[in-house]
Image: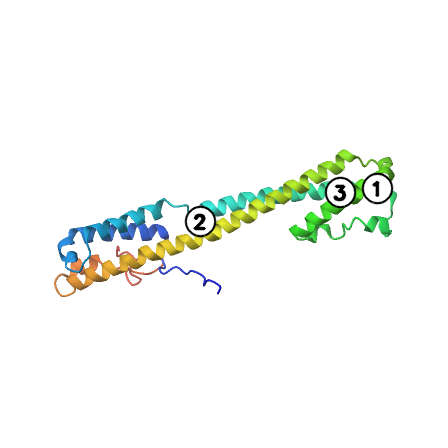
Amino acid sequence: MKKKEVVRGYNFSDGKLVTTVNAKIAFVRRDAAAFTEFGITAAMVDELESKTNLFSEGVTDVELVSDQTEATGTKDALANQLQEAIRGVMSRVVLKYEDNTAKYKKFGTEALSKQSDAQFLVVASRVFRVGTDMLPDLGAHGLTAAMLNNLKAIRDDLEQELISMNLKISDRDIEQESRVEGGNAIYTTLVKYTNTGQSIWASKNVAKYNDYVIYNTDSGEDPESPENPV
């Protein structure tokens, strides 16, 4: 069975989650005696703090997107080089064979810029292979083995960069899922503790009750009182 997509259980940012947890932990420690009556011990609070610190120090999506963007940029640059190399070959092929002939069409370079990455690699391999076979006839028009070998080298570099890019995309997906799961676990524990805090002070102390309120909004603040701190 396919795993369901993991969805964040809180609406504010991960940074806001961390600062909210740290703030609420301070209140829980202040009221430790009352929390002990509910089975929430200092060790449990320490564990939440430790998990939150690890979460805070984890790789963020901004970093992963940057890595992915860099890999995509490298891939695009290599693709442009490969297109130029292929055009360099074909500009010599057309001097020998008109573009409507079977021998020209054997290279299969029509609509080169519209090919998918996978198809583009296949086209490049074919140009190298066919060009090598026809080199004795095309040498007179300036095609050389060095040009074909350079094309093949760029093609192989592009293939490796595509693999690297796809791995980075996969790594980002995995890390995002793991981070969402980690954040949700922290938030779930936080809500349990703050709900307990509200229960403790609901009929005793309004100020302390408010210490345990979490606003699950984009900003993490009271939607009716934007200036009201969490």
Element carrying mark 2: helix
Quarter that holds the C terminus: bottom left
Instruction: Residue 220: tell me if it is visible.
Output: no
Q: Residue at x 46, y 62 (%)?
A: 3
| For residue 204, above or below residue 139 | below
* Sequence-first disc among 2 and 1: 2
Estimate the x, y position of residue 34 in percent, counting from the top left. 14, 57
Real-space CA distance between mark 1 and mark 3, rounded to the nearest whole angstrom = 10 Å
The circle on residue 128 is 3
Q: Residue at x 33, y 52 (%)?
A: 16
Q: Residue at x 73, y 36 (%)?
A: 149
Q: Is residue 60 left or right of residue 95?
A: left
* Sequence-first disc among 1 and 3: 3
The circle on residue 61 is 2
Amino acid of disc 2: Asp
Few, some or many C-alpha atoms within 10 Å of disc 2 (few <14, some 14-19, many ≥20)?
some
Residue that mark 1 sits on: 134
Amino acid of disc 1: Met
Q: Name the front one of labels 2 and 1.
A: 1
Q: Is residue 19 left or right of residue 69?
A: left
Amino acid of disc 3: Phe
Residue 142: name its quadrant: top right
* Sequence-first disc among 2 and 3: 2
